[in-house]
Amino acid sequence: MDILFLCTGNTCRSNMAEAIFNKFNKNEEIKSYSAGTSIEYKSQTSLNTNYILKNELGLDIKDRYAVLLNYNMVESSTLILTMTKKQKEVVKNEFPEFKGKMFSLNEYVNKPSDIKDPYGGNLNVYLETYNDILSSIILLINKLKEDSGTIYM
């Protein structure tokens, strides 16, 4: 199973979600990766995202470049999770044949709000986003575990 996390620029939220999921997921049959719907050429993980991931999870992804969403990613993913409902609708409109596997992350785990974009915010804003994503990822892993009866954490 491949899970694709999506946001706009792939420098803050979606790569944070990818890192958190891959850190806590223990099932080798499930992998996550991330992309953005509108990236800046040669943009890298934001400094604040890297700082938070390094401090919270011991992960250093400062050299990671943003990845632009493409057809092959959408086609090969089992589950596509966006950071907002609006992003989900944009991707559904672009790839309508795959709309059945597209959800916002919080919609999929039954949380009411979108994941707030920390871009341009201070470290506290990034930490709030990290904590929001972390709680959603834990819910996601538990949901996947319940759905299949396999232990992922």
Image: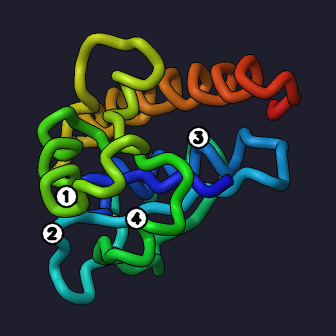
Mark number displayed over residue 56:
3
User: Which of the two marks, 1 or 4, is nearer to us in this view?
Assistant: 4
Q: Which residue is mark 4?
A: 74
- Secondary structure category for the residue under label 3: helix
User: Which of the two marks, 3 or 1, is nearer to us in this view?
Assistant: 1
Task: Answer with mark 2 or mark 1, whichever residue precedes in sequence.
Answer: 1
Task: Answer with mark 4 or mark 2, whichever residue precedes in sequence.
Answer: 2
Disc 2 crowd rating (10 Å Cα; few below 14, some 14-19, many 20+) is some
Task: Answer with mark 3 or mark 2, whichever residue precedes in sequence.
Answer: 2
Q: Which residue is mark 2?
A: 38
Q: Residue 36: horizontal and vertical position, in percent? A: 27, 65
Separation of marks 4 and 2 at Cα, in angstroms: 15 Å
Marks 3 and 1 close (CB-CB < 8 Å) = no
Residue shown at the point (46%, 77%) measured from the top left = 64
Q: Disc 2 residue type?
A: Ser
Disc 1 crowd rating (10 Å Cα; few below 14, some 14-19, many 20+) is many
Marks 4 and 2 close (CB-CB < 8 Å) = no
